[in-house]
Image: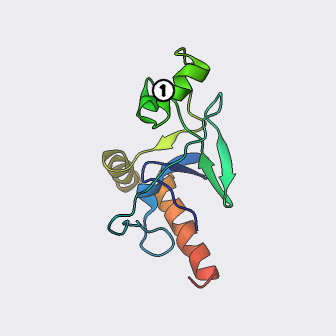
Amino acid sequence: DLYLSPGHALFLDGVLIRVKELVNGTTIAPVIPDDGMSIEYYAIMLDTHEVILAEGAAAETFHLKDSNHENFANFAEYKRLYGEERTVMTSYAPVLGGGWMHFKALLLLGVSPLVPMRDPLGDACEKINARAKELSL
């Protein structure tokens, strides 16, 4: 099993999609920790935002933006080792947002029947469900 934070993105069909957008209740499901259980996240930060394989899944590395690394438990150690100057990272691939962005994309699909339009989130969900059926999950 692979456990990712809801805001972590997977690389599917040329776009990064946050895990929370892919939850389907079977192959991708939220895990609620038991009482007293804590969750500890580890981030892999490279010089650039990249995609790596984690348990066979194409997952993003940490995407440094402004000061979002200051929430790390080891931020003081990181600052001591690497200093304060940070290079702004560009995204490895476009990040597909959910909510309003996905709603707008669906509206465009409905309004534009003559122009073939792509729904990367819907396509990714369909592929995940098809793969689950192949594996009988």
Compared with 28, 110 (above or below) is: above
The residue indicated by pointer 1 is 76
Q: Percent from the top left, x then y, of residue 128?
A: 55, 68
Residue plotted at (52% across, 68% down): 126
The front one of 78 and 133 is 78
Q: Secondary structure at mark 1?
A: helix
Name the one closer to the observer, 92 or 62.
62
Quarter-wise, where is residue 54 in the image? bottom right
| Residue 88 at least partly seen | no
Question: In the picture shown, does residue 109 fall above or below 47?
Answer: below
Q: Residue 68, relative to residue 6: is it above or below?
A: above
Q: Nearer the viewer, residue 94 or 30?
A: 30
Quadrant the N terminus occupies? bottom right
Q: Quadrant of the C terminus?
A: bottom right
Q: Is residue 4 visible?
A: yes
Instruction: Where is residue 103? Give x, y as percent.
Output: 32, 51
Total labels: the figure holds: 1
Instruction: Decide: is 61 above or below 137.
Output: above
Residue at (60% x, 20% y) in the render: 82
Residue type at mark 1 is Ala
Residue at the outermost top position: 85
* Residue neighbourhood size for the residue with mark 1, other residues' Cα within 10 Å, grouped as few (<14), some (14–19), many (≥20): few
Instruction: Residue at 69% x, 52% y: name it.
Output: 53
Q: Position of residue 127 (x, y in %)?
A: 57, 67
Residue at 58% x, 38% y: name it: 93
